[in-house]
Amino acid sequence: MDGVFVGRRRELAELGRRRSDAAEGRGGVVLVVGEAGIGKSALVERLIGDFGADGVPVLVGRAVLDEGMPAFWPWIRLLGAPAGAAHGLGQELLAVGRPAAFALAAAARFEMIDRTARALVVAATERGLLVVLEDLQWADEASLQLLRYLAGELPGSRLLLVGTFRDEGVPPLLTDVGGLGGVQLLRLRPLGVEEVAEYLSWVGAGEVHPSWPARVHRYSGGNALFVRELAQVLITERLLAAPAVELPVPVQLRRLVSHRLDGLSESCRRLLAGCAVYGEEVNVRVLEAEPEPLAEAVAAGVLVEDVAAPDRLRWSHALVRAAYYEDIPRAERLAWHRRLAEALATSGGKGRAVDSARHWLRVAVDQPSRRAAIAACGHAAQEAGDLLAFDDVAYWHGQALGLIEDDTERCQTLLALADAAYRGGQVAEALDWCAGAADLAEWLDRPDLLADAAIVVQGIGGPHATTVAQLCVRARDRLGEEDSARHARVLAQHALTMTINDIADADPVSRRALEMAERSGETDAIIDAVHARHQVVGGPDSVEERLSLGNRLREIAGTQDRPIAALWGHTWRIDAAFQLGAIQTVSSELVELEGLADRVGWPLARWHLLRGHASLALLAGRFDEAERLAESFRKIADRTQDLSAQGAFFVFHSLLWRRTGRPGDIREVLASLPESYVALAERIPVLMSVSAMLHLDGGDRDHAAVLFEGLRASIDGLPVNQRWTMIVTSTGELAAAFGDRDTAALCYRLLLPYGGYYDNQAAGCNGAVARTLGTLAAATDRLDDADRHFSTAATMERRIAALPHRALAQLAHAQALMSRGASGDRARALDLAEQAALTARRLGMAPAARAAAQLADELAGVRGGPVTLTRREHEITGLVATGLANREIAERLVVSERTVETHVSHVLGKLGLANRTQLTAWALRAGIRT
Amino acid sequence: MYATFHDNPPPAPAERYLLQHIGDGRQFTIMLWDTEERARAAVPRADEIYEVLDDWYGPAAEQAAHAASIAVFEGPVSAAHFEAGMRDHEKRLKPASATAEGFIRGLLLWQPNARSVRMVATAASLETLEADSRAVYTTPLPPDEDPALIMAPDRVEVCRVLDHVPAA
């Protein structure tokens, strides 16, 4: 309050503590909340002073109320400040190179956020850093996303972030931030009478009659802004030293402000009118303000200088500006808007296009001004697009739409609106705009625009895919036999929607799309067509083509700057190579993917990389490593709020649990399924199959049976896509477990052509299809076939060093041989079960180790188990298993050899074993060690 | 043409190679048959009959075979692997072996039930067999062939050729 600061001792103490914490590497976020005018900014100013005194850099950004402000606005301002540049920061952190292809806008936005957050933390390393964000209640969503993300990065840093916001109209995202762990809320209460007295004493140079503090406190309600304005009136009227009287002016702020401005010169008042029209912040060069009236406004405390930006001023309080704006006559207001619109259009700089558009819209009253407003909206949309702020892009196109009269231009704007809505995640809205554009394009007989309407929205499933397909049909009808990149993209889009909707005949459409795209030579068309083709040929039969499509994208990425093509190329090839068991190819693709992820920094690329490595670790039985990697890719999925990535973690987590039995409580695994997927897990086949196997292995057979019923009903007509193998193998395993011979036989027939492949993917590895074939053959009493399939499975797993799956194949093989009971089967089964038990125990596959050990015991005729042995017998058994003779054991335990012989004999008797060899084998599979 | 493998070969008139494993000294015979019926009569089960997909000769075709290698690809070889393997055979392995000094004859065998493959190569000596193998298998893949699709054999058996009885 006019450089005078009173009260707030508790808050200052708390902020002081946080300042010390940050200096010692325990940074964090403090949000100061309170009603308008309560004194949040004054408190923060005080803190800024303290930090400045310590030599700690301070960066300040403010959100503003003006409509259409660019995304990241407060961050852009603070990053661009000289203090930021001195610490390696800059506005370019929040710039994106090129519009993201496919629907990667969210990922690109996240990358910008991640990059900026990391840069801020690094900037704080040397001397610490205070970041202040004022008026967060007006912040755009992107800014709040960055704030939320940064909040998670601050513990362990030397950065303290202090935000202020009013507690009315708080955006939900800001409420989320307030609820984050480690984020502290400081709520400012109204000033007390003593604090008002202290303030009046300061501004009145001690000549304050004691009756005034209580009076001012009552009128102002302790609101600091009102106290200040009232005090100003009392000083002007020379009333402070005398006993309190009824206040001579109304207490509404608007009137108070008017009262304060009464004493200003006419030129200053005119300037303030321009400032009020300009906005919360004012660039004096754009305004072409004379220095004298400016200085007068600053001296009067109406405008405040910004130390970091000498050409910029801001209003002392938004309420003051609002109060002033209302009093400007309409004609004067319009004149100022036009003048500012013209000045801003030519002044350049971040945010200027938005400012210009905002003012043009206010004065679009005739044809020329409407054209100017439309053009300005286009520039503003472009500026918002550069920041991936698609809501803002849509806003500006929407503003322009209301002014456009030409139908072609209208159609193009509708398409731009559709594109912005789609990229902003508003699919239904985007399709509405597309439909409108398509109607207009048909009326205009413009197949090119109709085609554009068909390809705006991509990669969408469900009922929306049907709408897109209808747009494609309309476009194809008008495009006829045209051989063009545009037509190729429509065909690709149509093929994609047909695949998503499981409509047959997508194959020739996607083939034609690819041929046409290749003929056109246009990269975007080729990428779209390759993508569509990859989706169409997702089944196990087409693995060779998928590898080749991946290669095609890699070729494109190699010659043109298309990292997204490289990303898809690598990930498709990784999945295909997993299916083939070509582990060397998986590894080499992962090496290249790592290079790409390092280069582009996309979380999505990092996520694919971690997922691929996790799958390799799972395949090889390196479960601890797989768990760590899975946790890392889960964090990325959580941070990017990517639902499908979160679903992928659930699938992987389930597979890991089925191998290791960790964590002990299956509910922890089930809880990793994103909440919005819970209902889908009972309806979408791939999730149903994962969930059913999880419940089956977890002992909840009833739940597994319900899911199995759903799967069984749909298995025969299941679309053959990338998920097909996993669904059919799981359904087959469930059929075997529930004794459903018909379904087992059906799954056997479906899977038999693919016995040379693996049900392995980057999403998780489930081993050779041959193992499932063995299980299904055994379930349908084709035990000779089962014998053959399990042998094959073990060979295939050995080929790729997939020890866990080899152990599972051996265990299932042993069970099948025991069932068959032909000559020599029992001995083979025992051998296999022992091998399975040893491998499973060594790798930490608790469920398989238990099952294999039990089976081996049964086959070996072992009675009882480890619990039947005494402690001494247990110890001696472990020593026997290490290969020690009785004499050596006797020496080690300091007992007689005879005693050892007796113990060994007792153990053999208890377990029903014949000799030391059998005892050694039993001890090893039971995990008995010395 | 068809091929069968025997520990104790039947006395039927057919071309045959009597081989001995270098490692354990075990002997066995590969018999080559004109028709599937004749092959069928020589083995108890149909899944022991191999189709001869290719039979080709190298620069030492006129010499007597004293060494052989059998590259074994256990089944089931997937469709994708099989097709790529056949391309690899035609474009790389066969041309390379056809010019390898000391290479006598190659037989590419396919068991359709088990979907397994065996590739038999004969040479004038163990030394030339080794040199030929090195020459063939170090020939780079054609640039349009994807290494992900090329399987390595599950094992390679190296044998002496104790006897070769040509077709009558």
Image (tube, coloured by chain):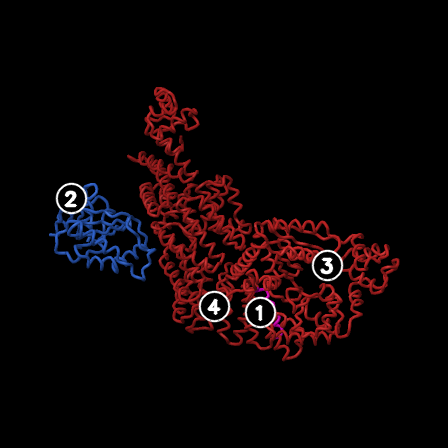
Chain colours: A red, B blue
In the picture, the quarter occupied by the N terminus of chain A is: bottom right
Q: What residue type is labelled 2?
A: Pro
* Residue that numbered label 4 is attached to: A473
Q: Which amino acid does label 4 sit on?
A: Val
**Magenta stretch in the rendered image:** A389-403
Residue at screen point 80% across, 67% down: A259
Q: Which amino acid does label 1 sit on?
A: Ala
* Spatial separation of the CA atoms under disc 2 and disc 3: 103 Å
Q: How crowded is the residue under tag 4: few (<14 C-alpha within 10 Å), some, or many (20+)?
A: some
Percent x, y of residue A399 = 62, 70
In the picture, the quarter occupied by the C terminus of chain A is: top left
* Residue that numbered label 3 is attached to: A36
Label 1 with label 3: CB-CB less than 8 Å: no
Observer-nearest residue: B121 or A427? B121
Which of marks 1 and 4 precedes in the sequence? 1
Task: Locate residue A664 relative to residue B139 in the image: left or right.
Answer: right
* Residue that numbered label 2 is attached to: B10
Q: How crowded is the residue under tag 3: few (<14 C-alpha within 10 Å), some, or many (20+)?
A: some
Q: Quadrant of residue B8?
A: top left
Observer-nearest residue: A852 or A440? A852
Which circle marks residue A381 in the picture? 1
Percent x, y of residue A181 = 61, 48
* Mark 4 residue element: helix
Q: Which amino acid does label 3 sit on?
A: Ala
Instruction: Please check whether the numbered discs 4 and 3 fall on a single chain.
Output: yes
Observer-nearest residue: A873 or A681? A873
Q: For the stretch drawn in magenta, what is the main secondary structure?
A: helix
Instruction: Please check whether the numbered discs 4 and 2 fall on a single chain.
Output: no
Which of marks 3 and 1 precedes in the sequence? 3
